[in-house]
Image (cartoon, rainbow, N blue to C red):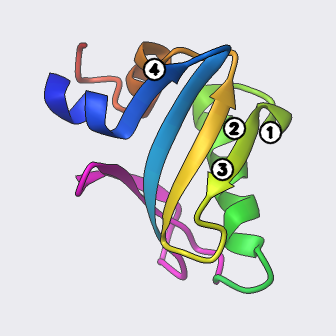
Amino acid sequence: MTDEIQSFVNDVTDGCTLSVRVHPGAKKNNINGLHAGAVKISLTTPPVDGRANEALIALLSDVLRTPKARISLVSGATSRTKLLRITGKTAAEVQTALFPAVQC
């Protein structure tokens, strides 16, 4: 999984970037694994007026145990494929929080 880790989460200055693929309007909020070099995340929130983006940041804030203010949307505001910047967390810390059973 090391190669896959490199493709979806990368260290940058003061944090990391995370690629996600969002499935809005799902039955429950869930992290479903990896898909095409991104973390696949299901959200119950529909993609209306940026609400799914807000729900994505809230979910990641809970999972990563970091304030919402430290998670920002870099690209993909209206796309299912998004790039997020997470300040104060390394790529390894994010990977461990998202997939605790998998060791780096």
Q: Quadrant of the C terminus?
A: top left
The residue tagged 3 is: 74
Q: Residues within 10 Å of mark 1 (few under 14, many from 20)?
A: some
The residue tagged 1 is: 68
Q: Is label 2 or label 4 in front? A: 4
* N-terminal label among 1 and 3: 1
Are dots 3 and 2 in contact, CB under 8 Å?
Answer: no
Q: Quadrant of residue 98?
A: top left
* N-terminal label among 2 and 4: 2
Q: CA distance from mark 2 to mark 4?
A: 15 Å
Q: CA distance from mark 1 to mark 3?
A: 14 Å
Query: At 43% across and 27% down in the image, what residue appears?
Result: 10
Q: Residues within 10 Å of mark 3 (few under 14, many from 20)?
A: some
Q: Give the side of residue 30 with respect to residue 12, left or right.
A: left
The residue tagged 4 is: 91
Front residue of this view, candidates 30 and 60:
60
Q: Is label 1 or label 4 in front? A: 4
Question: Tag 4's secondary structure?
Answer: helix
Give coordinates of residue 76: x percent, y percent: 58, 65
Query: In the image, which disc is placed on residue 61?
Result: 2
